[in-house]
Amino acid sequence: MDKVDIAKLTYEQAFTALEQIVAKLESEDQSLEEMLSLSEDGQKLAEHCSALLEKAQLRIQKIEPAK
């Protein structure tokens, strides 16, 4: 993955990048070093997506009426 500031990606952008990494890993056309680098990038993207989903869920909880 190019040196992109993951923290600036939207959920959709991060998820698309994660899908691309998974496809590359499944193709098995990379060296071990490339696969490790892709895996590390994928982990960072997955963590970012998870954090964005958690923030969205908190926002939803704030606007929902108390039950």
Image (tube, helix red, strand yellow):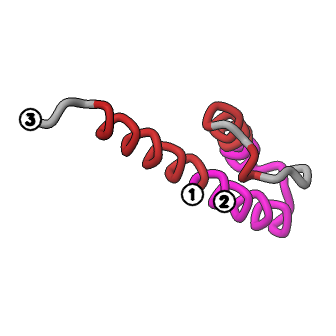
The residue to which callout 3 is attached is: 67
Verify CB contact (< 8 Å) between mark 2 and mark 1. yes
Amino acid found under the numbered disc labelled 2: Lys
The amino acid at mark 1 is Glu
Q: For this rendering, which residue is in front, 28 or 24?
A: 24
Q: Is residue 62 left or right of residue 45?
A: left
Give how far across and how far down residue 15 sits, in percent.
Answer: 63, 38
| Inter-mark Cα distance, 2 to 3 | 36 Å
Question: Between disc 2 and disc 3, whose residue precedes?
Answer: 2
Mark sitting earlier along the chain (3/1)? 1
Q: Nearer the viewer, mark 2 or mark 3?
A: 3
Horizontal side, residue 45 vs residue 31: left or right? left
Query: Magenta residues: mostly which secondary structure?
Result: helix
Tell whether position 1 is magenta. Answer: no
Give the left or right position of residue 39, taking residue 59 as reference: right
| Position of residue 53 measured from the top left corner of the image (x, y, whole percent) | 47, 43
Q: Which residues are magenta?
A: 21-46
Asked if the residue at tag 3 contacts the one at tag 2, i.e. Cβ–Cβ closer than 8 Å, the answer is no
Which of the 4 image quarters holds residue 34?
bottom right
Image side of residue 46 versus residue 67, left or right: right
**Label 2: few (<14), some (14–19) or many (≥20) C-alpha neighbours in 10 Å:** some
Q: Quadrant of the C terminus?
A: top left
- Identify the residue position indicated by label 1 in the image: 47
Q: Which residue is mark 2?
A: 44
Q: Amino acid at mark 3?
A: Lys
x then y, percent, for residue 30: 84, 55
